[in-house]
Amino acid sequence: MSILALNGCMAMTVISGVIGSVDSVAKEIKINKLEKKLDEIENKGTGNGTKLEPTVGNSTQKDMQ
């Protein structure tokens, strides 16, 4: 009986690993799509000819207060 239980646990472990891997790949694809969209928005500009500057990591003194 313990051999059957062990085989069941191994199967669930393998299935969980496969599901986790597929989920991780799906999330990576979504992140890449969002990054492309963000780059397009940043490169498009504000509509009046000025470009949008990335704000991540570019804090100013005003941001720090």
Image (cartoon, helix red, strand yellow):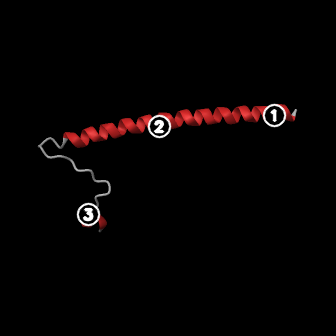
- Does the CB distance between marks 2 and 1 fall below 8 Å? no
**Does residue 53 lie above or below 26 as drawn?**
below
Q: Residue 53: give x, y in percent of width and height.
A: 23, 50
Task: Name the amino acid, label 1.
Answer: Ala
Name the residue carrying label 2. Answer: 27
Name the residue carrying label 3. Answer: 60
Which quadrant does the C terminus fall into?
A: bottom left
Farthest right residue in view:
1
Q: Determine the image quadrant of residue 61.
A: bottom left
SS at circle 1? helix
- Does the CB distance between marks 3 and 2 fall below 8 Å? no
Task: Name the amino acid, label 2.
Answer: Lys
Residue neighbourhood size for the residue with mark 2, other residues' Cα within 10 Å, grouped as few (<14), some (14–19), many (≥20): few
**Does residue 33 lie above or below 62 as drawn?**
above
Residue neighbourhood size for the residue with mark 1, other residues' Cα within 10 Å, grouped as few (<14), some (14–19), many (≥20): few
Task: Name the amino acid, label 3.
Answer: Thr
Indicate which disc residue 24 carries.
none
Q: Nearer the viewer, residue 26 or 48?
A: 26
Q: Residue at x 80, y 35 (%)?
A: 6
Residue neighbourhood size for the residue with mark 3, other residues' Cα within 10 Å, grouped as few (<14), some (14–19), many (≥20): few
Rounded to the nearest angstrom, the CA distance separating label 2 from label 1 is 33 Å
**Sequence order check: which comes first, mark 2 or mark 1?**
1
Name the residue carrying label 1. Answer: 5
**Sequence order check: which comes first, mark 3 or mark 1?**
1
SS at circle 3? loop
Q: Determine the image quadrant of residue 19.
A: top right
Rounded to the nearest angstrom, the CA distance separating label 3 from label 2 is 32 Å
